[in-house]
Amino acid sequence: MAVFEHDVLVIGAGLAGMRAALSAQAAGANVGMISKVHPVRSHSNAAQGGINAALNEGDSWEEHAFDTVKGSDYLADQDSVEVLCSEAGAELIALERMGVIFNREESGRLGPRMFGGASKARAYFVGDITGQAILHVMYEQLMKSEARGQTPLRLYEEWFVTSLITDGDQCRGALVMEIRTGEQHAVVAKGTILATGGFGRVYEPSTNALICTGDGMSQAWRVGAPLMDMEMVQYHPTTLKGSGVLITEGARGEGAYLLNSEGDRFMKTYAPNAMELASRDVISRAEQTEINEGRSVDGCVFLDMRHLSEQIIAERLWQIREIGIDFVNVDIVKEPIPVRPGVHYAMGGVKTDVNGATPMPGLYAAGEVACVSVHGGNRLGANSLLDTVIFGRRSGVAATEFGRGVSSFSVPESVIENEKRKVQELLDRPKNGDRVAKIRLDMGVSMDKNVGVFRTAEGLEAQREEVKKLKERYAKVPVEDKGRVFNTDLLFALELEFLLDCAEAIVEGAIIRKESRGAHTRLDFPGRNDQEWLKHVLLTWTPEGVRTDFAPVTITKWTPAERKY
Ligand SMILES: Cc1cc2nc3c(=O)[nH]c(=O)nc-3n(C[C@H](O)[C@H](O)[C@H](O)COP(=O)(O)OP(=O)(O)OC[C@H]3O[C@@H](n4cnc5c(N)ncnc54)[C@H](O)[C@@H]3O)c2cc1C
């Protein structure tokens, strides 16, 4: 066992984590960054369509902010949205200067594409690999920190955080497992930033990678930091039949149509003005209604790109063409591709302010793990990458500043010993329970059925019971690989516990919120109820059970109004 020390510890090496590490280094901190996968395999790598900024002539950050607030169904905190949108232009240019080769028009100017819920084209992109392009550039920047005269970054690559360390009041770092050896260590820090991404794998199907298991949300929850608006789970309307692989919204941005089994462009019934570019919650509900009413094939509708030129597809949607051919044997140039709504994004997460600070001193969060809240009830496409870099940067600065006033801390031996015992107990379990994969699948399928696009009290109560039972089954889950070296069986078991905590919080939030807003549609409470529910739902884990609190939504300029598309 070893103890490592840093001014700032960043947990997660996706876009939020890398941006946080870069800004903490620039602010003078000695930074450690942990990732359970190689940094450029972080899930940000999968982001396809773009990143928003109101840079075009005729656009303004205020219009971007209004679209974001409207898209959020007025649940977003408007002061946070103002920070997100007013800082977007400078951040995008900073990324470009770092080396991200965004798409350019013939004139040589940066050229954005349209995205759902946006009144202007403002999603800047690199083909359909935007996340990958930004992630690789930021990784290069981190590797160059020494050349910039900064303290070099210590990268704990393929290390797994099992829990956070606190001294009772304040976060002091994290307990970790080196995956290659299975050895457990402590990393002590003055400021700790969670950048562990979302919980998409609570559900099946999901567009998220298998590693998106809500680790940071569960870990923060377990040390008493509140989770906010966990019921707000985004379904993306175009996920591929079977696998749930994402077909980017950029496809509809380029002009793709949605058709039902009768060949009808059904969005004219649900959003006659915005059509396929309505926000994701609106389109997901429309698709699910078409599917439920029998105008589908094998539970899917179709995305039709045949009228886009082969050249546009080759230039801007080449990955989507390959995905279609590889996964469902459909060439989008010749045939419509079957899609359905699938879980995509967590609008809720660890509650933070605009500097990433959680209510627990010393603990910060940024990116999909956090709820600032800029997305409210529904995130607009291309606003998440923006969220990662804006609030990643701000949390890096804030955690460094906080650390300057923090004295050193020695982690008690008993804390590390307890963690070792917990892992050993998992390894020692007899083989008489269900395996991880079975429990995980049952969780995902039942969450989709009972806490999906449409929700009812009956389904939610059934799922509350189901999660209880899944937790009981988890208590007996065996780890069949008893070794210590790269034990993925053990890691999957640890991740399942995080997923189940997230499932519990999602269900609780969905039971509490008795209205329909954004992605949360209660058939038993149709319609948004601003009188009673224009507020955030906060859930805090306590040894006695989950505590519920409410917080007001911050309104600055935009009074809640009916959404029309
Ligand atoms: C298919 C797809 C396409 C998307 N396209 C877009 C788009 O075009 N535009 C847009 O704005 N948004 C898009 N999104 C959303 C966006 O990509 C994500 O919300 C965002 O990238 C999340 O970044 P992050 O840094 O918060 O987390 P991630 O990139 O998920 O990184 C999480 C990091 O935490 C680490 N980690 C997690 N748990 C642990 C642990 N226990 N121990 C150690 N390390 C841990 C991981 O290793 C990883 O490094 C898309 C999402 C998907 C699924």
Image (tube, rainbow, N blue to C red):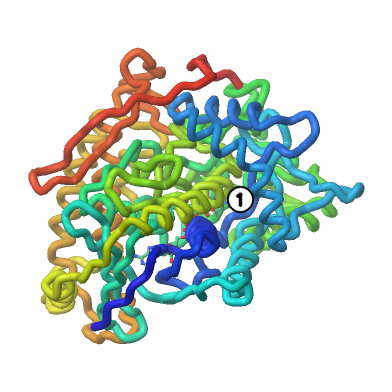
Q: Residue furthest right?
A: 107
Identify the residue shown where x is 59% and y is 26%: 66
Asked whether, in this view, residue 499 is left or right of residue 103, the answer is: left
Q: Is residue 43 visible?
A: no
The answer to which image quadrant residue 156 occupies is bottom left
Which corner quadrant of the image does residue 525 belong to? top left
**Observer-nearest of 267 and 105:** 105
Image position of 45 (left or right of 98): left
The residue that appears at 85% across and 54% down in the rendered structure is 311
Type of amino acid under label 1: Ile
Q: Tell me if residue 468 can be seen.
A: yes
Q: Quadrant of the N terminus?
A: bottom left
Pick the quarter of the image with the C terminus. top right
* Residue depicted at 48% across the width and 53% down the height: 397
Q: Residue furthest left?
A: 544
Rendering quarter of residue 523 = top left
Residue 343 in picture, x, y percent from top left: 45, 46
Q: Dot 1 corresponds to which residue?
A: 247
